[in-house]
Amino acid sequence: MGSLTDVLYGETMPNERLRSAMLQRGITPAALAEALKVDPKSIERWISGRLPYRRHRYAAAAHLGVDEVYLWPEALGADQVASASESEIINIYPHRWTVPSELWRNFFDNAESEIGVLVYSGLFLSEDAGVRRIFRKKAEAGARVRILLGDPESEVVAQRDSDEGIESLAAKIKNAIVMYRPLLSIEGVELRLHRTVLYNSIYRADEQLLVNTHIYSFPASEAPVFHLRRVAGATMVSTYAESFEHVWDAATLLE
């Protein structure tokens, strides 16, 4: 995507984020133009890389259900983005084991439409019968529950074992699969296996995230956890959420 300078000087690049958001929701340029009461040619120019007026950016983002800053990150100055992103931080825990157990359950129980788990094994979570019940309840109520586990046969899992000086991650993943498998018969629950190097484990409940950083030679339980909530104009949550989607798209459905 081009910068604001590019736009001002006519050296625009296509806005692939806008195009993708419209395609994912089945919204045509004409339909978006009608909803925003603008000329359809304006929508085409935005897709081509033109920066809309602020009121149009806000209206388009609201209609598409995404953040304005995600669609047009160049529209906000660095200071504005930094200030908004700081506001996304609810709490920071020095280690995952210091996150209260009731927070995990409340975190997922507050979700209404989207639950996501991106881990290598996350066995502590899959072993929690209360969390599994919440996943079941939320899926039955219409929420989408997506679980991403590391492929136990992959090189990245073997490397993670080596980095931590242990030889049990593949077994933990297989145990997690056993724990989650009964949920897979419920519509809305999906489980995929990934072969991606993880720099963070990501847990999502609608617009909130718990991000467990990964530290070389330390297990994830010893690493910090950031509790985040999406704020308009900020980028931390949207960046982690986009990373989740990239891993999801490349992962393999568990058979």
Image (cartoon, helix red, strand yellow):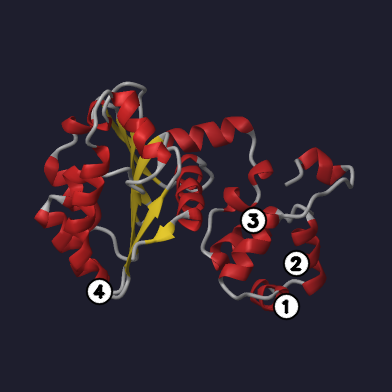
Residue 43, disc: 2
In the image, residue 94 sits, relative to residue 176, either above or below, namely above
Q: x and y percent of residue 53 in the render? A: 72, 55
Which residue is drawn at the image coordinates 63% and 53% (left, top)?
71
In the image, residue 218 sits, relative to residue 150, either above or below, namely above
Residue 30, disc: 1
Q: Secondary structure at mark 2?
A: helix
Which residue is drawn at the image coordinates 33% and 26% (left, top)?
162
Name the quadrant containing residue 120.
Answer: top left
Q: Which residue is mark 4?
A: 186
Q: Secondary structure at mark 4?
A: loop
Residue depth check, mark 3 versus mark 4: number of the one nearer the observer: 4
Identify residue type, mark 2: Ile
Whole-angstrom CA distance, mark 4 to mark 2, is 39 Å
For the C terminus, the image quarter is bottom left
Whole-angstrom CA distance, mark 1 to mark 4, is 37 Å
Give the mark nearest the N terminus, 1 or 2. 1
Whole-angstrom CA distance, mark 1 to mark 2, is 8 Å
Residue depth check, mark 1 versus mark 4: number of the one nearer the observer: 4
- Circle 2 crowding by C-alpha within 10 Å: few under 14, some 14–19, many from 20: many
Q: Which residue is mark 3?
A: 17
Identify residue type, mark 4: Ile
Give the mark nearest the N terminus, 3 or 1. 3
Give the mark nearest the N terminus, 4 or 2. 2
Name the quadrant containing residue 52.
Answer: bottom right
Query: How many callouts does the rendering have?
Result: 4
Residue depth check, mark 3 versus mark 1: number of the one nearer the observer: 3
